[in-house]
Amino acid sequence: MKPGGLRAIQRICAAAATAVAMLATVPAEAVTRLSFSGVVDSLSAGYALPGIDVGDAIAGSLLYDPSVADGQPLNWIGYYPGAINGFSATIGALSFTQYTAQSPNSEIDVINDDFAAGLYRDNLYFRVAVTEAATPDIARFLQLSFSVAGTTRPGVLVDDTLPADFDPLEFSLRRGFVTVLPPGASQGNNFVLNSVTVAPVPEPRMSLLMLAGLSLLWLGARLHERRRRPAAPSPTRPG
């Protein structure tokens, strides 16, 4: 290999190594995706939204940050305002997104009262202000509820910490509703959740680190191959 080509590869490797080092110092952003689907099973008079009927399908997902600080001093109630930073769903023919003009526009509540009235109770509530595509300036309110009430504690919640990952099947009740504001109204278009998945979202930083690492491996292999390749014989000059 010519010295110039070797120096070029060395410069590329050095630049990639620098990029890897810089990416490694970027703080990680914790994000969890909760995807859900179900069906509307009842309507509450006075709180139901027009255009959503019993039997309508619901499907959607939300993103939340499990590193948000607890805003409640009690050690069995966790209050996490603003933790939801992305939401979209369809209910029947209606499409909903997060209503960012509402402040606060979301909260997550964790209730873990070890033993009350002879029962163990674990509850996880996702509450978010939403808007429908046809009426983008009107705020609505949607809640997803995961609850357990029984004599056997499932252990799905640890104190009042917001879980970055949990198994929805360990909750005996998985329901939701969408209604008018204010959040105090706990009924509306009520639905049962038939399928829920929860998983941390891979960090963009990790993907970039993997890409940079693969680039370094490829460059190293190319350099090794060129070093082993025999030099081409010099052409003989006619006598």
Image (spheres, rainbow, N blue to C red):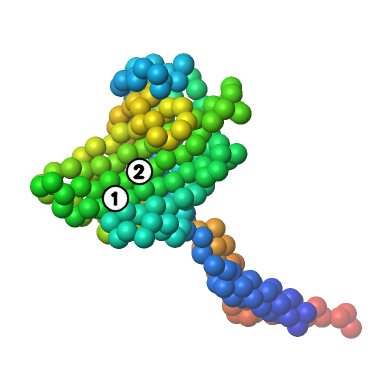
Please state which amino acid type lies under the numbered disc 1. Ile
Disc ID at residue 111: 1
Identify the residue at the far right of this view: 239
**Viewer-nearest residue: 158 or 121:** 121
Q: Can residue 208 be seen?
A: yes
**Kind of element beneath mark 2:** strand
Q: Position of residue 38 (x, y in %)?
A: 34, 29
**Res 217 quadrant in image:** bottom right
Q: Position of residue 154 (x, y in %)?
A: 18, 51
Q: How busy is the neighbourhood of tag 2: few (under 14 within 10 Å), some, or many (20 plus)?
A: some
* Drawn side of residue 161 relative to residue 31, left or right: left
Image quadrant holding the C terminus, namely bottom right
Q: Position of residue 70 (x, y in %)?
A: 41, 58
**Kind of element beneath mark 1:** strand
Residue at x 48% of width, y 19% of height? 93
User: In the rendered view, would you say 65 is above or below 144?
Assistant: below
Image quadrant holding the N terminus, namely bottom right
Please state which amino acid type lies under the numbered disc 2. Tyr
Residue at x 73% of width, y 80% of height? 7
State yes or no: discs 2 and 1 in contact (Cβ < 8 Å).
yes
**Viewer-nearest residue: 10 or 23:** 23
Residue at x 42% of width, y 40% of height? 127
Residue at x 46% of width, y 16% of height? 50
* Drawn side of residue 31 relative to residue 136, left or right: left
User: In the rendered view, would you say 107 is above or below 99?
Assistant: below
Q: Can residue 217 be seen?
A: no
Disc ID at residue 193: none
**Res 228 quadrant in image:** bottom right
**Viewer-nearest residue: 123 or 216:** 123
Q: What separation in Å lies between label 2 and label 1 (alpha carbons)?
A: 9 Å
Q: What residue is shown with label 2?
A: 125
